[in-house]
Amino acid sequence: MSDWTLYSLADAIRTRRISPTEAVRECLQNIERSKLNAFVAVNAERALDAAKRLGEELDRGQVRGPLHGVPLAYKDLFFIEGMPASCGTSVPDYFVAERTATAVDRLEQAGAITIGKLNMTELAMSPFGDNARFGDCRNPWSFKHCAGGSSSGSAAAIAGGLVTAALGSDTGGSIRQPAAYCGVVGLKPTYGRVSKAGAMPLSWSLDNIGPLGRMVRDVALLLNHIAGQDLDDRSTSAIPADDYLAGLEGSITGVRIGIPQNYFWDGLEPDLRTSVIDAAQSLGQLGCVLSDIELPDPKAINSISSLLTRSEGTAAHGAFAQKNPDVLAPAINERLKLGYQVSAYDYLQAQRLRGQLTRDFVRDVFSKVDMIITPVAPGVAPRLQDMTAGEIERVLERMGHLTLMTRPVNGLGLPAISVPCGFSVAGLPYAFQLIAKPFDEATLLRVAHRYEQSHDWWRRRPAT
């Protein structure tokens, strides 16, 4: 399984070089042997039954879609009929929805097989990959370092060869950061591009559902099926989705990429800075037009995003925490307590100011460039023990520090993608982030794809 990408595996199944049952069985064997702790629930019987049924359909010449017979896995905040949704907590059925999440259902309608649920930090409220209930998710490149969060299992399972692609959620960087730490591709779509129906909320005005994969092509393939309006989620946009897969091979000549001169480079590890700048230069050589750009200060939108997450997160989960005070980790409980300190006045003013800052940012930045390139995090994946040790106040500070470069994008509602761009001396992945104007995922994916095709970072596999 570690040799396949989602796209190549789907093609192999469609052309009968491998059967759905063979693919599922190999996934199950790899999951059972794995020490990554990426999965929290596996439904082997259900997956094998689906594989058999889909294989028989292929024998009759029936193909449900491009994902026919491909095993996928989902972060444990998606509701899937017949499976628990603990959302990283010790309560097996904490989150209950009326039906399978829209994004999962759309993938299953395209022929995908649900093989299990993936580890995540409790209530999606930590960027470390730690979990007191199921155990910490391990980074496939180094077990001592963070897998990232909160979609830790989604990124680790792909990097570790357990599945070829997965879904996660992103409220302040929870897709892009674990993707960066684990050396895979992760996309946070434009707010409203993908339905959140059937997924546990953390911050309904900032949450995004998005795909992770080994390659950009894999992410585009998943986005093709999950993007689009959903009447069960009123925040989804009526703007038609593109064919993201078909658009990958288009030209990127003349695409304007801005290199911010402020905010994103503060406190950055020097070698990571070099790697991201080298990635920008590579895009320039591929035909993009590079320019330095001064951004409206992202600190304000970062602060607003933090306030909204505190308030909305507590509204969503505060009652659960009060009823079950010993269930959650101390740092998660503390984060939820902070939400009670946000007044209605501050919350409404934050939403009002957010709208103005977003309009200003889109107007000022995207009139000059088509996208910007930044780091995803201040450095490579840090040691997990270093992040979780000490007083709760210090732990919360570290949480905020690791999301400084991703959280503003959520506040602005923009699409962004994390792409591998090298490795540290210690063998940990580097990544850069491309951020585009609203609903321009097609250009974002095309540029990321061209960079990926000109390098071989995606071919490397962790020894674990």
Image (cartoon, rainbow, N blue to C red):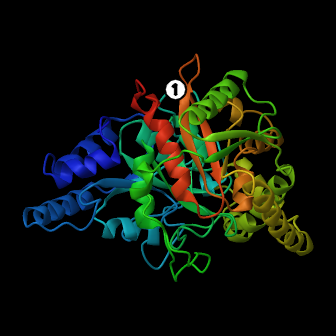
Q: Nearer the viewer, residue 204 or 65?
A: 65
In this view, the residue farthest toward the left is 60
Residue 383 visible within the image:
no
Measuring 74% from the left and 66% from the top, which residue is drawn there? 314
49 left or right of 323? left
Can residue 48 be seen here? The reply is yes
Kindly give the residue lying farthest to the bottom in the view shown: 231
Q: Residues within 10 Å of mark 1 (few under 14, many from 20)?
A: some
Expressed as whole percent of the image width and height from the top left, the position of residue 190 reads 61, 62
383 and 293: which is toward the camera = 293
Seen in the picture, residue 132 relative to 304 is either above or below; the reply is above
* SS category of the residue bearing label 1: loop
Image quarter where the N terminus lies is: top left
Viewer-side residue, 351 vs 434: 434
Q: Is residue 395 left or right of residue 376?
A: right
Residue 131 in the image: state x and y as whole percent. 58, 45
Task: Tell me which corner region of the image, top left, top right, bottom left or bottom right, holds residue 281.
Answer: top right
In the picture, the quarter occupied by the C terminus is top left
Residue 141: x percent and y percent?
49, 27
Note whether 323 is above or below 218 in the view shown: below
- Name the residue located 67 percent from the left edge and 55 percent from the top edge: 326
Q: Is residue 460 above or below residue 368?
A: above
> Measured from the top left, where is residue 159 in percent x and y?
43, 37
Q: Amino acid at mark 1?
A: Ser
The residue lying at 39 percent from left, 65 percent from top is: 83
User: What residue appears at the point 10 percent right and 66 percent down from the top-left corner?
Assistant: 61
Query: What residue is shown with label 1?
Result: 142
Relative side of 456 to 51, left or right: right
The quarter of the picture where residue 26 lies is top left
- Count of numbered tags: 1
